[in-house]
């Protein structure tokens, strides 16, 4: 009976087939029926069955009499207490999941705020918006470290009957739409109509002004300079950048009627740490103001409910960061909208940089 019990415990199968090796985690090796870390296991140091003496340590797959410089003995192996997040400053002193170990002290990565036992992105975390424990109210989201409505922070489309910034004012009722225009038909061809309703049209000028939306010389068309990516105005016609991208694209907001450019990319959440999305917008002329918004999924893009925004101001570069939730799968299609607030140019290109869940 004792022999039968040991055979069963060792993994023998009743049909005579040899036992299958266990499925081991990444970094582990199967030694018989066990999964071991051969870099540090003194009973299987460097390879299965190679044991160190009772006085020795196993480090980097080799039996040693003492730990190399920069490491200290922890049990029967060696640890870099200055940088090891599982043994930070002392053996078995582990940092929180998102923390790093810097000079023997647990700390949050750059861009994250230390809120007790977790690292949070205070620019987007609704429970810690702008500061630890500063929670947003029901129905609000955290954008740029400020609690507010779940929508964008200004009216970005002034002719869609929608209240983009949920302030109770839609389209031309909203002061954000001052200066916004739509296309209209004038007596002299194409023109633009501002929120006051008047159609501004050409009067037979000697030459066209590129991008103003008006048929200045009355020849039947206005002049613009769309880039090769157009049309990219609507969420369902975004220019797709790829999957888990590190990408830079050059494009123009060439006209008063070019309200926005849209881009999309696939983000794959496949790491054990909190990955991030970084979006930058540079190269703006001094007389142009463009905002940048990031959305998770096309529904959020169409509803104008971003997970992060940047609204720096006239001529200023834009930058936003979204840090994904550590314990959740944030794999999704993400959308970036570059929105015209003021200004346009037929020849000045902006540079949009996107790093997706990297």
Image (spheres, helix red, strand yellow):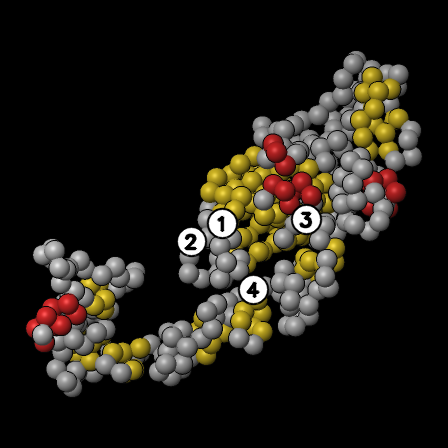
SS assignment at label 4: loop
Residue on which the image places disc 2: 270
Residue on which the image places disc 4: 111
Residue on which the image places disc 1: 331
**Residue 31 appears in view:** no
Q: Considering only order in the chain, which callout, 3 or 1, is on the residue closer to the N terminus?
A: 3
Q: Residue furthest front?
A: 1
Pointer 1 with pointer 2, Cβ within 8 A: yes
Marks 1, 4: nearer the viewer: 1
Q: Residue furthest top?
A: 219
Residue 311's place in the image compared with 131, above or below, is above
Residue on which the image places disc 3: 305
Crowd rating for badge 2 (residues with CA inside 10 Å; few <14, some 14–19, many 20+) = few
CA gap, disc 4 to disc 2?
21 Å
**The N terminus - image quarter:** bottom left
Pointer 2 with pointer 3, Cβ within 8 A: no
User: What x and y, as percent, mark residue 118?
Assistant: 53, 71
At a point 69% along the width and 43% down the height, the residue shown is: 303
CA gap, disc 2 to disc 3?
25 Å
Marks 4, 3: nearer the viewer: 3
Q: Considering only order in the chain, which callout, 3 or 4, is on the residue closer to the N terminus?
A: 4
């Amino acid at each position: 009976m004792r022999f039968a019990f040991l055979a069963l415990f060792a993994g023998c199968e009743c049909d005579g087939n040899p036992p299958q090796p266990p499925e081991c985690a990444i970094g582990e090796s199967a030694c018989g029926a066990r999964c071991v870390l051969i870099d540090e296991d003194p009973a299987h140091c460097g390879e299965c069955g190679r044991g160190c003496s009772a006085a020795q340590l196993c480090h980097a797959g080799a039996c040693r009499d003492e730990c190399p410089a920069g490491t200290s003995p922890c049990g029967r192996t060696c640890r870099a207490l200055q940088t090891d997040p599982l043994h930070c400053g002392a053996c078995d002193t582990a940092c929180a999941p998102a923390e790093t170990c810097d000079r023997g002290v647990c700390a949050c990565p750059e861009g994250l705020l230390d809120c007790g036992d977790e690292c949070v992105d205070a620019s987007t975390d609704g429970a810690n918006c702008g500061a630890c424990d500063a929670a947003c109210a029901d129905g609000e989201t955290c954008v740029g470290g400020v609690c507010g409505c779940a929508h964008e922070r200004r009216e970005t489309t002034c002719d869609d009957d929608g209240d983009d910034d949920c302030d109770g004012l839609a389209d031309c009722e909203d002061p954000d739409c001052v200066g916004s225009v739509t296309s209209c038909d004038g007596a002299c061809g194409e023109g633009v109509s501002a929120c006051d309703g008047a159609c501004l049209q050409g009067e037979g000028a000697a030459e066209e002004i590129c991008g103003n939306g008006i048929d200045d010389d009355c020849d039947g068309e206005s002049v613009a300079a769309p880039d090769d990516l157009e049309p990219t105005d609507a969420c369902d016609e975004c220019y797709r950048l790829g999957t888990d991208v590190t990408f830079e694209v050059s494009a123009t907001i060439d006209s008063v009627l070019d309200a926005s450019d849209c881009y999309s990319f696939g983000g794959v959440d496949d790491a054990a740490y909190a990955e991030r999305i970084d979006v930058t917008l540079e190269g703006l002329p001094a007389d142009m103001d463009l905002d940048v918004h990031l959305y998770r999924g096309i529904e959020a893009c169409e509803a104008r409910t971003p997970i992060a925004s940047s609204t720096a101001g006239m001529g200023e570069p834009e930058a936003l960061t979204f840090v994904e939730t550590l314990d959740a799968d944030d794999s999704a299609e993400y959308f970036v909208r570059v929105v015209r607030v003021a200004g346009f140019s037929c020849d000045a290109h902006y540079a949009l940089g996107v790093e997706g869940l990297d």
